[in-house]
Amino acid sequence: MAARRPPSKAQLRRERMEAAATYPLDWLEERSGLVGGVKYFLFRNVPGDINWMQTLGSATLTAFLVQATTGVILAMYYKPSPHDAYASIQNITDHVTMGWLVRGMHKWGASVFIILMFLHMARVFLFGAYKYPRELNWIVGVLLLTMGMAEGFTGYLLPWDQTAYWASVVGINLNGTAPFLGPWLAQFLRGGQEISGDTLSRFYSIHMLVIPGAIIGLIVLHLYLVIRLGVTSPPWSPEAAGMERPEPASTVRKGLTHPPAAAEPGGSE
Ligand code: HEM
């Protein structure tokens, strides 16, 4: 039997560099299991015949992240008081470096976010992906839709110009016509008998803290359920919606660096 050749210097150097590069990931994995979780999320199996319409959920997520990022930047310059709000918006648009771009992205991005949510919901509906066992995820989605629209409504008042003011009057009055809770809701939204500086602070707090917090929590739950239940195949697929798909045991090392080997031959996954 031929003797095994000792590893060359270059080989040893590469192995040492590889170990140094993956050390932080292995350190984190050993203490938290987080790397394994992210790896499972990124490299999990999905049906072989999913199509582009199934990227609408991720597109909605991207739109939300853009809103969150641009919103944080705007909040650094916006002043939520009746005296300063309009002027601070003008300052952002006309004087802050790239302020016009960030404000434009946030303003138009709000519509993109809502439109994408509706398109995603339509896809889920048309694919029958709301049926057993995904009813709970549909309910979480409905809450996300409600929160998304409430985010648009509360954000609309913030520029504190005529359009913002009168649109909010109409919106609050509409809420006030709801049976039983309507008058209470209108009073709560106004923070008094009339729209005032109190309404602006209230809308700002709800727009900046309450709703984004709720949306983030709901998205985490939504994605957890997507991962737990798996993604539905299109209705024309030979695979029935909601069918269990057994996953082969992974033989891959713990780090995030190597994706699992290709699926077994013959499988559609
Ligand atoms: C912030 C808003 C939302 C985000 C970020 C989001 C994100 C996602 C993602 C990434 C997926 C997996 C990929 C896909 O199927 O596209 C998904 C699936 C799903 N979403 Fe949403 N979604 C949102 C709103 C909604 C709404 C409004 C509904 C319905 C009322 C909904 C119901 C569902 C259901 C039932 C699934 C599972 C679909 C399947 O298994 O094929 N989602 N969502």
Image: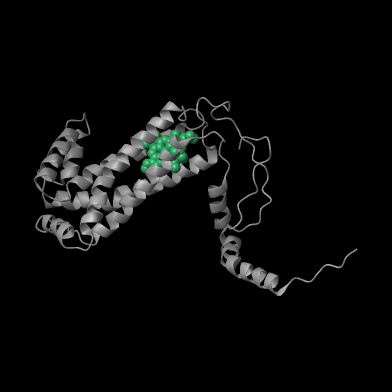
| Labels in figure, total | 0
Q: Is residue 140 visible?
A: no
- 234 sits to left or right of 248: left
Q: Quadrant of the C terminus?
A: top right
Compared with 69, 218 (above or below) is: above
Q: Position of residue 130 (x, y in %)?
A: 45, 30
Rendering quarter of residue 162: top left
Residue drawn at the location 44% of the way across and 40% of the way down: 55
Rendering quarter of residue 13: bottom right
- 129 sits to left or right of 263: left
Q: Position of residue 88 (x, y in %)?
A: 15, 59
Q: Residue furthest bottom?
A: 9
Could you say which is closer to the camera, residue 166 or residue 47?
47
- 216 sits to left or right of 73: right
Q: Is residue 255 visible?
A: yes
The image quadrant where one finds ligand 1 is: top left
Q: How is the image coloured?
A: one colour
Residue drawn at the location 22% of the way across and 53% of the way down: 103
Could you say which is closer to the camera, residue 215 or residue 187?
215
Residue drawn at the location 56% of the way across and 67% of the way down: 24
Residue drawn at the location 63% of the way across and 68% of the way down: 19
Q: Quadrant of the N terminus?
A: bottom right
Q: Position of residue 232 (x, y in %)?
A: 51, 33
Q: Position of residue 56 (x, y in %)?
A: 41, 39
